[in-house]
Amino acid sequence: MMPVSLLIALLIAFGIESSAATVPQADVSTRVFETFGGISLIASLAFGLGFWVAFRASHIAASTSRLRRMYVLGFRLITFLSLVVYGWIIHFVGWSKLVRTNWGLEGMVLLDDVVVFLPYLLIQLLVWWGLFFAERALQVRQGFGPERKLGRYLFLKGRQALGLTLPVILLYVIKRDAVTRVFPNWAKSALFEPIEIAVLGFLVLALSPCFVRIAWPTYSLPPGPLRSRLLHAARRVGFRFTDILVWDTGQMMVNACVTGIVPGFRYVLLSDGLLESLTPLETAAVFGHEVGHVAHRHFLYFALFFMGTLGLLALCGDGFAVAGRLIAESSWLSAKNASFLSQLVEDGGLLLCLLLYFWFVFGYLSRRFERQADVYGSKVVSCGQSDCPPHADLDAEDDSGGNEGRLQLGLCPIGLRIFADALASVARSNGLDQRNRSWRHGSIATRIAFLQELEQHPEREYEFQREVGRLRLVLGGILTSAVVISAVSQVWELFY
């Protein structure tokens, strides 16, 4: 649910301890100037890309697929540079030290954390502002793009992103400030950090439906044939949830999501643009995709993944700290150069590992999970007969018949085609080239090709499911080991 870039920014701000020394009072104004210089650099790139795309689109009279691909590439580069610059602001400029020590905000509940995160919030706002002109010019929704209003666009983007981020910061503050003050002895225990991370992660997942209802404008899907179809499909596959919500994006987004790990407190969101663009069967297939994320426990695994990531970062941090100390104590560098290089190795090396880790490991895992959910979505609209057509629509009527409560696990050719058509419709409605790559989801073209391969060779689904199972097991074992080793090392340092 939360944008991964925002999650990485939170890890940069609060999950990695900065090794930067306290900022000398004489350097405070210089550090503030450097901070705003970094923010201005990213803003310049975003506005430059936005105006360039708008200029090109106006001169070619239509948004070509090549121009869209260049825009997507530029957007990803700016997102990456935003994280790099924010990491530089936190760990090299010393922004967190400046806020908490020099300005005396240490211990001021929530205020100090919000100010620490403020540079990234400003970067995000300016990036949205700059890219607004490109997105409007590209007319993501044909006939709607030119009517977009900047104020509403920024409001919706900010509400969507920050409404999910600020509650997480609030939970972090409660954990760090309130708990450590009420239970100071417990906070000194070596077991405190891994347990508090687990509790915080569970609270974020459990309370995410609250965050979504507050952050995003939604309303319940009105009664009618579509709602009846989706409710019938949910009962048929044993999926429990609270409600199906229409996500009001002003027709700016064609997407869907599910939130909540507790069955009685879970929502499925379908955007207004998606409901307008897809047929009822295609909508049911996308609904089934979101159900698949829950059925395969992807959210719980991602929670464990991020906990293990923190353990892995702790081990990497210890390694970079040793390297930094060796550089700082070297005799072949001046004291100033040794200090700078030591900080560069400790913070820069860890930040680089974090970004590469998310790009390759998390990206690959996420793409496997998306395909697994694609298969599940295809099953929801499948009749289970490998030799169809004729195709039986199991959710055509909510009649409490023999299909009710019976989990349909079999794929059929028509079910696979329905989901493939849904993916193509989503790409077309969003103005995306099916070949555009996504590090989290993969390209639409490759996902459709995978479904077509399953249609020709149904037996390969079993091989794919085994492959994903092995990936989960191996990666889970590595990350669990990292958490255990990190906890043991903390206990060892505490007693020895």
Image (tube, rainbow, N blue to C red):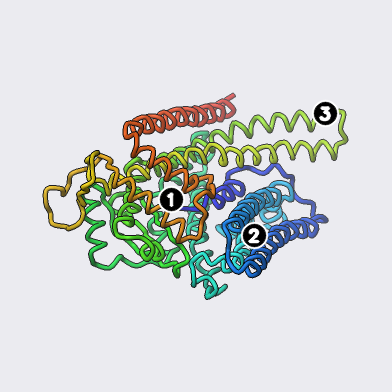
Number of marks present in the image shown: 3
Left-right relation of 455 to 32? left
Q: Secondary structure at mark 3?
A: loop
* Mark 1 vs 3, N-terminal side: 1
Left-right relation of 100 to 407? right
Q: Amino acid at mark 1?
A: Val
Q: Which mark is residue 111?
A: none
Q: Secondary structure at mark 1?
A: helix
CA gap, disc 3 and disc 2: 37 Å
* Mark 3 vs 2, N-terminal side: 2
Q: Residue furthest top?
A: 496
Q: Nearer the viewer, mark 3 or mark 2?
A: 2
Quadrant that contains the C terminus? top right
Q: Secondary structure at mark 2?
A: helix
Question: Are circles 3 and 2 on residues that touch, CB within 8 Å?
Answer: no
* Mark 1 vs 2, N-terminal side: 2
Q: Which mark is residue 204?
A: 1
Label 3: which residue? 330
Pinpoint residue 235: horizontal percent, then vertical percent. Answer: 21, 51
Q: Amino acid at mark 2?
A: Ile
Residue at the spot x=37%, y=44% of the render? 373
Residue at the spot x=37%, y=66% of the render? 276
- Residue nearest the observer in this picture, 28 or 49: 49
Label 2: which residue? 123
CA gap, disc 1 and disc 3: 44 Å
Category of crowding for the residue at label 2, using alpha-carbon neighbours closer than 10 angstroms: few (below 14), some (14–19), many (at least 20): many
Pinpoint residue 383: horizontal percent, then vertical percent. Answer: 22, 45
Pinpoint residue 145: horizontal percent, then vertical percent. Answer: 53, 70
Category of crowding for the residue at label 1, using alpha-carbon neighbours closer than 10 angstroms: few (below 14), some (14–19), many (at least 20): many
Q: Amino acid at mark 3?
A: Ser
